[in-house]
Every structure is written in C-alpha cells, then in structure tokens.
Image (cartoon, rainbow, N blue to C red):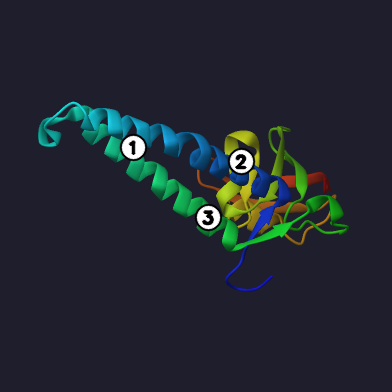
C-alpha cells in the first residue's frame, strides 16, 4: 500500500458509494427544491426556511466532497482473498479477557469505516495495533482507556 492511500474493505467501499449515490441523486435535488421553495417566500435575510436549507445544502456538499476524497484515496482490499496465518488488516478477530472470560469479536477495518458499536475497529486504533501480526492462541496485554491494563487471549481469527 502506498503512503498516501488508506486501506478500506470492499464492503466499506460499497457502503460509501451507496451513501454518495443517495446524497447526489436524492438529497442534493431535494435540498435544491427546498431552497427554491424558500426563495419564493420573500425576504431572504429573514427567511428561516431558506437559511436552514442553505445550511443543509452546505452539509450535503461537504459530505459529498469528503466521501469523494475518501474513495479517491482508498486502497480497497478484498478481505475474502486474504490468506494469512497472522492477524492483518481485514481480519475478524475473536478475543477473550483472561480475567473475566468475556469474549469479544472485532474486524480490523479502515479509519473511515470504523464503528466500535458494530465491532469494527480502525487499523490505527490501539487495540488493532496490538493485534496486528499476532497468531491464534497468543496472549497480549492491552492498555484499555476505560478498563486499564488487560490481558487478552486470541481465540481465533479469519478473513471473509
């Protein structure tokens, strides 16, 4: 991967492309229509509908620019094609807290697709950095911001 390109899973790319398509084909035309309607209500300096629509338009255009930039700088990785005996980008990893026995599942993804509530952690996160290069069965220490130092056991990992 080149220095300027950021890794992204194929699924992450598909989701961003769908969001971009929705913004361009649905949201943008809707907000343009809302601005035109608000313009028809007279004095623009005191028109709350117009101001709100212009603010929403700025948000939509900003998001379109951000997604376009992200996609143009993405190094898309088809994680189902990865065959590694070590944890790398795209891996689904199952770990167990040595102390509590609590099991967790994460997938290591690109920065723009990370969502901890969905079990997707950024490749640049401290936990992902602790996992990269490790193998099934290994134990590792991790300094959790919330729980302090923890020892985890890698139960398994796979790519899909």
Query: What is the secondary structure assignment of the residue under circle 2?
Result: helix
Q: Taking 16 as reference, is 8 above or below it?
A: below
Q: Taking 84 as reference, is 150 above or below it?
A: above
Q: Which residue is mark 2?
A: 18
Q: Which residue is mark 1?
A: 56
Q: Earlier in the sequence, mark 2 or mark 1?
A: 2
- Residue 84: horizontal and vertical position, in percent? 86, 59
For the point 35% across and 41% down, the residue is: 57
- Residue 126: horizontal and vertical position, in percent? 58, 55
Q: Earlier in the sequence, mark 1 or mark 3?
A: 1
For the point 50% across and 46% down, the residue is: 145
Query: What is the secondary structure assignment of the residue under circle 3?
Result: helix
45 horizontally vs 159: left or right: left
Residue 52 showing in the rendered view: yes
Q: How many marks?
A: 3
143 horizontally vs 44: left or right: right
Residue sticking out furthest to the bottom: 3
Of 34 and 104, the residue lying toward us: 34
Of 68 and 99, the residue lying toward us: 68
Task: Tell me the distance, in whole angstroms, between the alpha carbons under discs 2 and 1.
Answer: 19 Å
58 horizontally vs 118: left or right: left
Q: Are marks 2 and 3 in contact (CB under 8 Å)?
A: no
Task: Tell me the distance, in whole angstroms, between the alpha carbons under discs 1 and 3.
Answer: 18 Å
Q: Taking 106 as reference, is 87 above or below it?
A: below
Q: Few, some or many C-alpha atoms within 10 Å of disc 1 (few <14, some 14-19, many ≥20)?
A: some
Q: Which residue is mark 3?
A: 68
For the point 60% across and 47% down, the residue is: 113
């Amino acid at each position: 991967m080149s220095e300027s390109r950021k890794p992204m899973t194929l699924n992450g790319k598909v989701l961003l492309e769908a969001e971009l398509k929705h913004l361009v084909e649905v949201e943008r035309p809707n907000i343009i229509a809302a601005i035109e309607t608000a313009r028809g209500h007279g004095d623009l300096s005191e028109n709350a509908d117009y101001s709100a629509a212009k603010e929403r338009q700025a948000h939509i255009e900003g998001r379109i620019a951000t997604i376009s930039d992200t996609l143009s700088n993405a190094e898309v990785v088809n994680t189902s094609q990865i065959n590694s005996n070590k944890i790398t980008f795209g891996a689904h990893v199952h770990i167990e807290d040595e102390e509590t026995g609590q099991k967790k599942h994460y997938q290591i993804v690109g920065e723009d697709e990370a969502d901890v509530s969905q079990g997707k952690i950024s490749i640049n996160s401290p936990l992902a950095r602790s996992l990269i290069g490790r193998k099934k069965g290994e134990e590792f220490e991790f300094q959790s911001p919330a729980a302090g130092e923890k020892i985890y056991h890698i139960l398994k990992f796979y790519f899909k």
